[in-house]
Image (tube, rainbow, N blue to C red):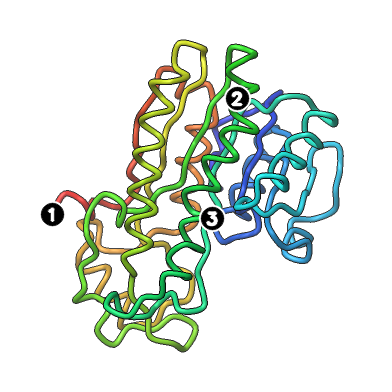
């Protein structure tokens, strides 16, 4: 069970990308640990997978790339529960031509992904994080990727598929996640004196239906010899949301089974 020994009683957590693979697991774990969760995702239908609204779950359809949408979501949260204690910038997107070769990658797709993965985190930090700084306490956690701190090993994608289609990791993903790490460090310095901690979590590859070839190729590059489970990453998210990480600021918690030691 994820985070069985970590409690978040009395904390209000705002989370973008709440209906995604990691998001759904994190929301469930946060609720189980005693937190109230404001779940943000673009699709109302996807948010409904998290369950009905309750005293502990507030779902808001939000486009993180749109400033007005983000501000409206923050206003709803503040009116319902007050300023969040923790903001998780977890939203990420794939464009129509996400897997196109670098030499042919369309500018429109580049801008679309950057608008969600990086600019969206900035907009949410303004809307949800700034009130934390004004209050004098809070935490922001940004979800990065191993490919934001090291380059992809292109060899693992030979014969690899996900949901029946060939996959790779495009340059926009690496660039947007690397930029998010830069934003993390900046805000850790900018808001630290006001009691707001800003950290990042860097997941390694999480198994979610990749074909056998990919799983084998990927696992051979990991000292622990396997891909991550969702719970592996969620446990790290719980830690960064909790008071157990109260002296971490500007830190990148890399949960990758050792991938980045090589």
**Disc assigned to residue 262:** 1
Eyeballing the image, is 188 above or below 116? above
Sequence order check: which comes first, mark 2 or mark 1?
Answer: 2
* Residue under pointer 3: 116
Residue at 73% over, 36% down: 74
Of residues 32 and 214, the one drawn nearer to the viewer in this rendering: 214
Task: Report the Cα–Cα distance between label 2 and label 3.
Answer: 19 Å
Eyeballing the image, is 112 above or below 197? below
Q: Quadrant of residue 259?
A: bottom left
Label 3 crowd bin: few (<14), some (14–19), many (20+), radius 10 Å: many
Sequence order check: which comes first, mark 2 or mark 3?
Answer: 3
* Residue under pointer 2: 130
Of residues 6 and 125, the one drawn nearer to the viewer in this rendering: 125
Residue at 64% over, 25% down: 85
Is 244 placed left or right of 59 in the picture? left
Q: Check disc 3 and report its element: helix, strand or loop.
A: helix
Where is residue 203? Give x, y as percent: 39, 52
Q: Check disc 2 and report its element: helix, strand or loop.
A: helix
Of residues 92 and 218, the one drawn nearer to the viewer in this rendering: 92
Sequence order check: which comes first, mark 1 or mark 3?
Answer: 3
Task: Report the Cα–Cα distance between label 1 and label 3.
Answer: 30 Å
Where is residue 147? Give x, y as percent: 30, 57
Residue at 59% over, 32% down: 126
């Amino acid at each position: 069970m994820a985070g069985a020994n970590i409690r978040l009683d009395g904390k209000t957590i705002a989370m973008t990308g709440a209906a995604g693979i990691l998001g759904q697991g994190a929301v469930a774990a946060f609720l189980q640990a005693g937190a109230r969760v404001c779940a943000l995702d673009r699709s109302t239908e996807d948010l409904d997978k998290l369950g009905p609204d309750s005293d502990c779950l507030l779902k808001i359809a939000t486009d993180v790339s749109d400033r007005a949408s983000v501000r409206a979501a923050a206003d709803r949260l503040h009116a319902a529960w007050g300023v969040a204690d923790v903001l998780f910038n977890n939203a990420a997107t794939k464009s129509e031509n996400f897997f196109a070769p670098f030499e042919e990658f369309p500018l429109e797709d580049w801008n679309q992904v950057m608008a969600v993965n990086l600019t969206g985190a900035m907009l949410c930090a303004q809307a949800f994080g700034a009130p934390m700084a004004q209050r004098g306490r809070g935490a922001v956690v940004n979800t990065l990727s191993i490919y934001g701190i090291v380059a992809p090993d292109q060899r693992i994608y030979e014969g690899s598929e996900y949901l029946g289609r060939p996959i790779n990791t495009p340059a926009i993903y690496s660039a947007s996640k690397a930029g998010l790490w830069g934003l993390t460090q900046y805000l850790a310095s900018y808001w630290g004196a006001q009691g707001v901690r800003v950290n990042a979590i860097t997941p390694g590859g999480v198994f979610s239906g990749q074909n056998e070839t990919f799983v084998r190729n990927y696992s051979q590059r990991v000292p622990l010899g396997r891909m991550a489970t969702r719970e592996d990453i969620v446990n790290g998210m719980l830690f960064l949301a909790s008071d157990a990480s109260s002296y971490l600021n500007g830190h990148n918690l890399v949960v990758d089974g050792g991938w980045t030691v090589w």
